[in-house]
Image (cartoon, rainbow, N blue to C red):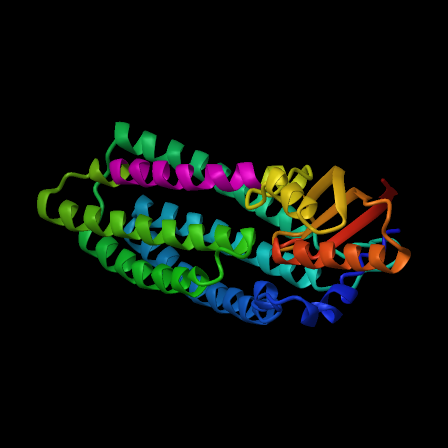
Amino acid sequence: MHNHSHEPASGHTHTHSHGHHGHSHLPSTPDRVGAIFVWSIALNSVYIIAELAAGLMYHSVALLSDASHNVSDVASLLLSLLAFRLARRKSNSRFTYGYKKTTVLSALGNAVILLIAIGVLGYESFTRLLHPQPVEGGVIAWVAGIGIAVNAASALLFFRSRKNDLNVRSAYLHMASDALVSVGVVLAGILISFTGWYWLDPVIGLAVLAVILFSTWSLLVESFRLSVDAVPESIRLEEIQHVMESVPGVRRVHHIHIWAMSTTENALTAHVMLDSDLVFEEKIKTIRRLKHELEHQNIPHSTIEMEQG
């Protein structure tokens, strides 16, 4: 019963007036997304080297801590890319769903990495607040300015695909929050060079960490939900049940389970009670129609068990 036969549905599309507009945008994304990850990793790696060098030369903990934060970002981008590649590996007799779920684990891992980075940098900023140290404001501002360009460019790359995939959203959040970090560091650098207020360095650091914490929390919650097979955020179980029950020939739908197979693909199992007067051919057609409706609800894999009314 577990052959997720969504082929018949697509072969059946011409009978429905709404065609296939609902799921035409999905197949083209993976290659593009993979390329975006590679570009972003390359861009950020070059920047990290420059930032570390400047931080060491000018003894700026702001630059060093920002660099270490960027290292954690590149690590998480690599994690996402690996998950992306794994997710496209074919299923086998042991991993019947393939490795799609690695994308969820990667998103969860990313959220945890970010929280750890926030903890470390928070501690660092706090100790610096108690004991401010002189730093070279101008250099900080220039290096962080390059950071704004690198991170904003990376964030823009991810922006278009962020709605389709939790990992892409996590990468987008990372890059966007990094651009914010860099803006903060630039402002601090400029102010420090004019005023000599060295305490600004850790203050801006703490403010930025609060912003990152806020964006990371939702990522952590959602990726945890998906890893324990909760219904994905974008799907309402009651709505799905209503859509299924409004298909002609369907009496009642129960025992519905919806979960995420990956950060982009959802699956469903359900028991469906059909009208008792339907002949076998009509029952098969009704099931196909159900599967097709589910594809439009972003549930490409469905296993439906028929029950007699």
Magenta residues, dominant SS class: helix
Image quarter of residue 253? top right
Image quarter of residue 226? top right
x, y percent for residue 101: 70, 50
* Above or below for 223 versus 80: above
Quick one: 139 or 270, which is closer to the camera? 270
x, y percent for residue 255: 77, 36
Residue stretch in magenta: 203-222
Give the residue furthest to the front. Answer: 277
Give the residue furthest to the left. Answer: 194
Quick one: 253 or 25, which is closer to the camera? 253
* Above or below for 119 versus 292: above
Quick one: 16 or 170, which is closer to the camera? 16
Quick one: 58 or 308, which is closer to the camera? 308
Q: Which image quadrant: the C terminus?
A: top right
Instruction: Find out whether residue 218 is within the magenta segment.
Output: yes
Instruction: Find out whether residue 171 is within the magenta segment.
Output: no
* Residue shown at the point (73%, 39%) measured from the top left: 256
x, y percent for residue 138: 18, 55
* Above or below for 110 versus 254: below
Compared across the picture, whether 299 is left or right of 174 comes to right
* Residue shown at the point (33%, 30%) measured from the top left: 127
